[in-house]
Amino acid sequence: ALANKDAISKVWKALGGIDVEEAQASVPEDLQRILQMIRDSVSVPDFNAKVSELLHQWIIQESQAHLDLSLVQRNLNNSGLVRMCKTVGDLLSALGRAGVACKTYQKALTILDDDQEMPETTRKQYMITCLDNVVAASRTAGDLEGANKALIQLEALRDSTSQNWQD
């Protein structure tokens, strides 16, 4: 599922729309008591936001663990592993963890550097996307040196790609 960006995006969006006031309970009095406890301790919007944040963090932890296992076991082809790295990197970026996202995008670049079987145009497209993400994540993380290094690689790759089209 992590290699499928649409599936994880739907889950991510659903977790962002949590509303405790829409909850159901088998005993209506329990629901009212729980809601009152929430209102007495924090506001409902704050509670919803915290639950959403914790669920997003959990999804990321599980996604990272699944990615790490997949990288060790190599139970997907390289395209699937690269897509998974990108998806996990995007999730990390969305949660404000740009430094870790950058490392995750770089894992995808390592896979692409080592790949000898992927069609060259597909490999270059993946590399351009990953380098774009490394640049953005590095800048967000405050790593301007890393962003500039990735930008130089990105420009060189784009130049080589455009030269191939002109030949």
Image (cartoon, rainbow, N blue to C red):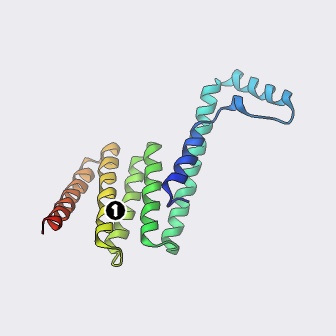
- Give the amino acid type for the residue marked by disc 1 in the picture: Tyr
Which residue is at a point 51% across and 52% down the rendered structure image? 6
The picture quadrant where one finds residue 15 is: top right
Q: Nearer the viewer, residue 54 or 120?
A: 120
Which residue is at a point 80% across and 30% down the rendered structure image? 31
Q: Is residue 55 above or below residue 149?
A: above
Q: Residue furthest bottom?
A: 116
The picture quadrant where one finds residue 66 is: bottom right
Q: Would you say 138 lies left or right of 28 here?
A: left
Which residue is at a point 46% across and 67% down the rendered structure image? 80
Give the crowd class for mark 1: few <14, some 14-19, many >=20 residues within 10 Å.
some
Q: Residue furthest front?
A: 166
Q: Would you say 17 lies left or right of 163 here?
A: right
Which residue is at a point 31% across and 62% down the rendered structure image? 125
Residue that badge 1 annotates: 126
Q: In x, y percent, where is residue 99?
A: 38, 50
Q: Is residue 44 above or below residue 118?
A: above
Q: Nearer the viewer, residue 112 or 61?
A: 112
Q: In x, y percent, where is residue 21?
A: 70, 28
Q: In x, y percent, where is residue 166?
A: 13, 65
The picture quadrant where one finds residue 35 is: top right
Q: Residue furthest top?
A: 40
Q: In x, y percent, where is residue 123?
A: 32, 68
Quadrant in the picture for the C terminus: bottom left
Q: Is residue 126 above or below residue 151?
A: below
Q: Is residue 31 above or below residue 13?
A: above
